[in-house]
Image (spheres, rainbow, N blue to C red):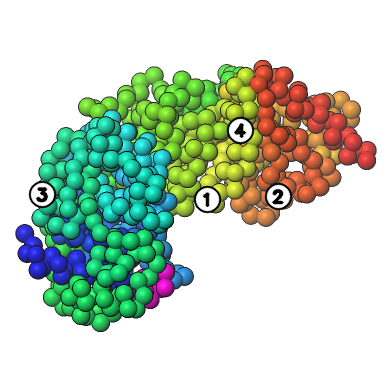
Amino acid sequence: MTSPIEHDRLANALRALSMDAVEKAKSGHPGLPMGMADVATVLFSRFLKFDAADPTWPDRDRFVLSAGHGSMLLYSLLHLTGYESVGIEDIKRFRQLGSKTPGHPENFVTAGVETTTGPLGQGLATAVGLAMAERMLVAEFGATLVDHYTYVIASDGDLMEGISHEAIALAGHLKLAKLIVLYDDNGISIDGPLTLSDSVDQVKRFEAAGWKASRVDGQDPEAVAEAIAAARNSDRPVMIACRTTIGYGAPKKAGTSKAHGEPLGADELAGAKAALHWDAPAFEIPAEVASAWRAIGERGRGKREDWQRRLAQAPAATRDEFTRRLLRERPQTLGAAIATLKGKLIADAPAIATRKASELVLEAIVPLLPELAIGSADLTPSNNTRTKAAKEVTPDDFTGRYIHYGIREFGMSAALNGITLHGGFVAAGATFLVFSDYARPAMRLAALMGLPVVYVMTHDSIGLGEDGPTHQPVEHLAALRAMPHMRVFRPADAVETAEAWELALTRKDGPTVLALTRQNLALVRKEPSERNLAATGAYELAPSPVGPAIATLFASGSEVEIALAAQALLAEQGVGARVVSVPSLELFLAQPEEVRRGIIGDAPVKLAIEAAVRFGWDAVIGPDGLFVGMERFGASGPYRDLYAYFGITAEAVVERVMSRHNG
């Protein structure tokens, strides 16, 4: 046990570094690090299993600072415990361009940061995914290789965000017993006292969601330690409300919103250090305190080495599979399975919705991919994501791989991030494309972090029909395509769907959306190909049947068959047209210029067809190119009537081409 004097000095080192860094940057949030320093010190010095020398050790405990604005707390912890990623010069360069200590924690910048946080609530929700992955992995490989906790520091803001409801409800339902949330219950928000806007009893709220919850004095290290020790033996997730003083130690700003998001100022900083009996110069840590913190960072080395020995002693098949999964390597049989399925689809030529085609792909590959953890936000029958042999994840059995997320698109998407970050799984989740609006903030973080999450988003256009404009995505494809590192596939038939799945599963550097139809589509890929034609984002599907092409018709998804029908009508008039299928517009635009030029071609008339807004297509057809698609929200009615009503037909394409050609 750490003595009170030793604890105070350890905690005050965190406070001092945080205050100094924020003051030097003239920007940042000193209040949370000052208030939660005691809690963090207890957690890291007495409980957290980690080895600073190996930030990616698979069996480390996970620590998530959901309150990412308090990032200097995390950076101070990483620096003091000996992570090479955060030296004292990095602390001094807090919030500076190119530093390893950005304003909010970024896991792709700083080793030791488990997940990017800052958008409140998402760290907590991502931690639910981390805890789910731990439970699923231990159910498969056993506690010899997988046995760790997930800890979260969350703020009032985290718990006010709506995603917190989705996250804590899911965690409580699944009884994620090794998830422990340390709530910074300081009663202050940016506007002032929390009572200005909130009066929720968070302990009762968590208890109602199936958690164990308690209150402690967050400035009493022994009380905090007792609460964490009890939480580690719980059969449910635990929330510990740690009553703290924001800006603890600051003579005038402590306990006020002034300590939240601005530097203390020179006088207040000096007063705080005096109150804390901290007389070391700025950015300097007394040798004995630095040594004690460094010993904390080295304490887990023996446990890590023991784990490495256990892994080495495991049966070769277990060891190889465990390692393959952590490296995100896919089974060598995946490509052959996709090729076999493509051959069968071409032979059978089914006219099916691409959501149904996706189900056929899953039936073919799930037996080969034990790491595929897929689920739906309560739309399983519509998304077609559950295979016949799928086994559900339940509170009492985590050997399954199908997850019922409930009507929680945002919570699901954040959990997918956590499952992916944890390692050992390919995470996929499903909903309607229009509800990507609910999921978008977590999808954005997946793109920012470069996580290979897969989103199965069905009912991708007015083609869903009678549910009407509330459910018909019009702007969503453009919005998702605009997101850096997000890759969107809108396959035209079953073969392209198989290719899109293959590309999504083999991608390691970012997330993928599969936008799939409700309505049936004829097979447009009639000839077998050893190559994955969707890999360039676009390809010539059908050359001009009547001499040089006057027009090139570009289309995605369900509109490819409209382009083919228009090509035939134009041919009857002696006008040649090429058809280019564009399953992934942004992947196509990322190709080398010579590839793009070859596929776009030099036909004088360029026309794109998509049952969505035009935004983004000018990069292919040019600002003077023609577009047949949507200019307003949809309507309720049978989908064929809707296509005719909105003028997305082969006849409309022919009219536009001929008008321009004869212009």
Residue closest to the eye, 189 or 14: 189
* Mark toward the start of the polypeptide (1 vs 4): 4
Give the number of callouts. 4
* Mark toward the start of the polypeptide (1 vs 2): 1
Nearer to us of marks 2 and 3 is: 3
As displayed, is residue 326 above or below residue 15?
above
Nearer to us of marks 4 and 2 is: 4
Q: Which residue is mark 1?
A: 485
Q: Which residue is mark 2?
A: 619
Residue 286: x and y in percent read 18, 78
- Helix, strand or loop under label 2: helix
Marks 3 and 4 close (CB-CB < 8 Å): no
Q: Is residue 609 visible?
A: no
Where, quadrant-wise, is the C terminus in this rendering?
Answer: top right
CA gap, disc 1 and disc 4: 21 Å
Q: Which residue is mark 4?
A: 473
At x 82% / y 26%, what residue is drawn? 651
* Mark toward the start of the polypeptide (4 vs 2): 4
Marks 2 and 3 close (CB-CB < 8 Å): no
CA gap, disc 3 and disc 4: 51 Å
Q: Which residues are magenta?
A: 20-30
Q: Which residue is mark 3?
A: 226
Residue 655 is left or right of residue 120, and the answer is: right
CA gap, disc 2 and disc 3: 60 Å
Residue extending farthest to the right is: 662
At x 84% / y 45%, what residue is drawn? 604
Marks 1 and 4 close (CB-CB < 8 Å): no
How many residues crowd mark 2 within 10 Å: few (<14), some (14–19), many (20+)? few
